[in-house]
Amino acid sequence: MHSLALMAYAFAVGLTLCGLAGAIFELAAGRRLGFHPPFVRRERFAVSLALMVAAGPLMLTNEAIAARRAGAIDLTAAVLCGLGAGIWAMALGVLTVELALLVSRLLG
């Protein structure tokens, strides 16, 4: 049961981080977040990579919803995109929790 609680906590942390990052980037750019300029550019590769790591699950979900509404993908593909975004958010949460624990050990 302890492992399940840790997984749920990591998932919640990942969703929170990607939601906050996505909302900040959408407010700054004034556009819907997605895998297109101004969010992804070759000239600013490092910034684009950091953006995609932090807000990637939200970007993937936005693109999947837009593609589903346009009829470009079927329901199975949309569900798989949602599953991938969930796994991505959990991995982001695990990374964030591990970094927080590392920083607390180094400072304390």
Image (cartoon, helix red, strand yellow):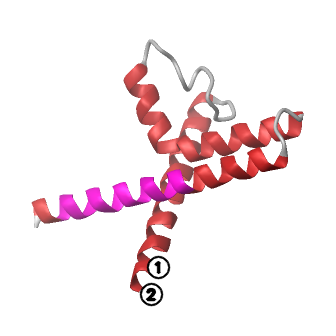
Relative placement, left or right, of 84 versus 31 is: left
Q: On the image, numbered disc 2 is attached to which residue?
A: 1
- Residue at (27%, 56%) from the top-left corner? 99
- Residue at (60%, 20%) from the top-left corner? 37
Q: CA distance from mark 1 to mark 2?
A: 5 Å
Q: Between residues 48 and 25, which one lies in front from this camera angle?
A: 48
Relative placement, left or right, of 14 versus 72 is: left
10 Å neighbourhood of mark 1: few (<14), some, or many (≥20)? Answer: few
Question: Where does the image place residue 66, in percent across and percent down from the top left?
Answer: 79, 37
Local secondary structure at mark 2: loop
Residue 10: image quadrant is bottom left
**Image quadrant in which the N terminus is located:** bottom left
Question: Amino acid under label 1?
Answer: Leu
Question: Where does the image place residue 76, in percent across and percent down from the top left?
Answer: 78, 49
Give, as a single range, the part of the protein colored magenta: 87-104
- Residue at (68%, 30%) from the top-left corner? 31
Task: Assess whether residue 23 is covered by the magenta stretch.
Answer: no
Please determine whether, in this image, residue 102 is positioned above or below residue 63: below
Q: Between residues 28 and 90, which one lies in front from this camera angle?
A: 90
Q: Report the residue that reaches farthest toward the bottom.
A: 1
Q: On the image, numbered disc 1 is attached to which residue?
A: 4
10 Å neighbourhood of mark 2: few (<14), some, or many (≥20)? Answer: few
Relative placement, left or right, of 101 versus 2 is: left
Q: Contact (CB < 8 A) between labels 1 and 2?
A: yes
Q: Report the residue that reaches farthest toward the front.
A: 76
